[in-house]
Image (cartoon, helix red, strand yellow):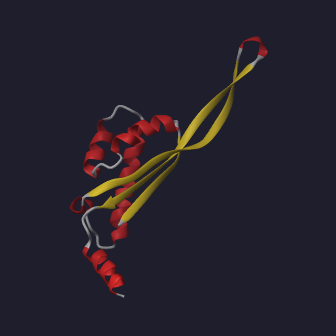
Amino acid sequence: MKAQAKLNNIPMSARKMRQVVDAIRGKKINDALNILKFTKREGGTWCEKALLSAIANWEQKSNLALSADDYDLTVSEIRSDEGTMLKRIRPAPHGRAHRIRKRTNHLIVVVENSVAIDNEAEVLGASEEE
């Protein structure tokens, strides 16, 4: 079973966020949370927030009040896409103006369990028999 979380319009560039995102892609959630907690990059706090939200969404979606610790959740997909850009003007010499681009990004985190849930296995087994 998969669950996802989205964070939109994070006020930092997607390129800087991707450096953090690449470090946790495919990892178990405990390892990923430890990496994010102890990284010095700003993107770590945003990724941690999104990952915790995805875990909570998985627990809510399971409808069985399951704990995420028992089902070996992994970060199956995580990506950072470019968001909108705020364009500002900075004065430059000789009456000119230079453009400042304040970049944002969108973060999408998908977590998936590797241990099968009993109800999920029963539903899958019933659909295969038909």
Q: Which residue is drawn at the image coordinates 21% and 62% (left, top)? A: 70
Q: Quadrant of the N terminus?
A: bottom left
Q: Is residue 117 left or right of residue 54?
A: left
Q: Please identify the quarter of the rendering in which residue 117 is found.
A: bottom left
Q: Position of residue 114 (x, y in %)?
A: 27, 62
- Please identify the residue farthest to the top as the structure is shown: 94
From this viewpoint, which residue is outermost toward the left? 70
Q: Residue at x 39, y 48 (%)?
A: 49
Image point 78% across, 15% down: which residue?
95
Of residues 53 and 28, the one drawn nearer to the viewer in this rendering: 28
Task: Find residue 5 and report its horizontal and vertical position in percent.
Answer: 44, 56
Q: Residue 8 in the image: x percent, y percent?
A: 53, 49
Judged left or right of residue 82, residue 115 is left
From this viewpoint, which residue is outermost toward the bottom? 130
Taking the view exactly as shown, the residue that stands out farthest to the right is 95
User: What is the quadrant of the C terminus in the image?
Assistant: bottom left
Position of 1 relative to 44 (above/below): below
Total labels: the figure holds 0
Residue at position x 33%, y 49% from top?
A: 26
- Is 51 situated left or right of 31 in this image? right
Residue 103 percent across, percent down from the top left? 58, 36
**Residue 92 picture quarter:** top right
Q: Is residue 130 above or below residue 98?
A: below
Residue nearest the viewer, comparing 8 with 124? 124
